[in-house]
Amino acid sequence: MTLGLMTDRGNSPLVRSLALLTLAGAGVATALGVFAHMDATADLNPLSWTISDYAVSDRGGAMDTAMLVLGLSSLALPVALWLRGCARRALAVLLMVWALGLVASAVVPTDPPGAPEMTFSGYTRRYVSVAAFVSLPFAGVLLLRAVPGMGRRVVRWLSAASGAGLLVLLYVAFPGERVMMGLVERALVLTELALLAAMALPLARRLDPAARRLPAVPEMLPDPAPGDGWERPRERELTMAC
């Protein structure tokens, strides 16, 4: 499906509700994540210990709940995009990988810090979480043409920042010997949360009632004669463009 600029249609109540569910889930997950850090033991340093380290220290606690809430609420976004006519197959798959990867990260147990060997569940959790955080920036790139106005620039920059954060995290995890890995990971998580919100916001927006009364310019004005220097006015970008 080709994504083209939408100018005279609003989002349906169901689409807005699904987008708001995603935004609410991101907000609740952020609050739970902050609480998990405040409730953690003093020997866990957020600059060096990863989010998974926090989760394993309180299995089934606030951090696991935050990932579960974020994953489940993110499932509403590809549905909203499909209802809006924006869900290209690749975009839907990437968003499903993001959401289901977070759900799997919440329910699959990981290994405690300092374990001599990683278990199967530890590897599983590692790679499903990696898949989740890799998929969202690519989804943002695929959605760029559909995001109206300034939101397009925000999604572009956040997608680029997320990609850069993934590269920094990869360096820190291997040749960087995990120095400040917790800080890098948290910066990446916050960036991708902002990207998720930027992708959902146009779907949660109502069309301006005044704009509903604007005539459709392409239907009201004739095509210009060749060489007369007149250009057809551009339509307003109001909500998600599909």
Image: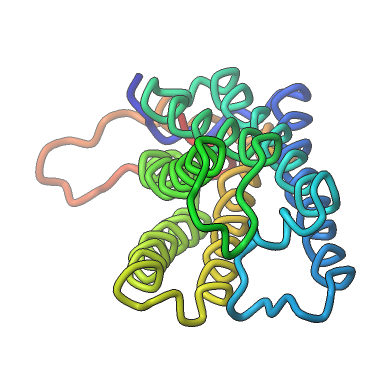
What is the count of numbered marks?
Answer: 0
Residue 34: quadrant of the picture: bottom right
> Going by the image, does 4 lie left or right of 227?
right
- Front in this rendered view, residue 78 or 153: 78
Task: Please name the residue shown 35% across and 78% down the image.
Answer: 176
Q: Residue at x 50, y 20 (%)?
A: 85
Image-quadrant location for residue 135: top left
Percent coordinates x, y for residue 152 in the rendering: 45, 54
Q: 230 above or below 128?
A: below
Q: Quadrant of residue 218?
A: top left
Q: Residue furthest left?
A: 227
Q: Residue at x 32, y 42 (%)?
A: 232
- Which x, y percent locates residue 22? 71, 39
Which residue is depicted at the point 84% across and 56% down?
32
Quadrant in which the N terminus is drawn? top left
Color theme of the render: rainbow
Viewer-side residue, 5 vs 93: 93
Compare residues 112 and 178 and report the one nearer the observer: 112
Query: Would residue 6 be found to the left or right of residue 53 on screen?
Result: left
Q: Is residue 230 left or right of residue 1?
A: left
Residue 108: x %, y % from top left: 65, 36
Does the image show residue 146?
yes
Residue 15 vs 201, above or below: the answer is above
Does any portion of residue 233 appear in the rendered image?
A: no
Q: Residue 116, how many percent across, how many down? A: 51, 57
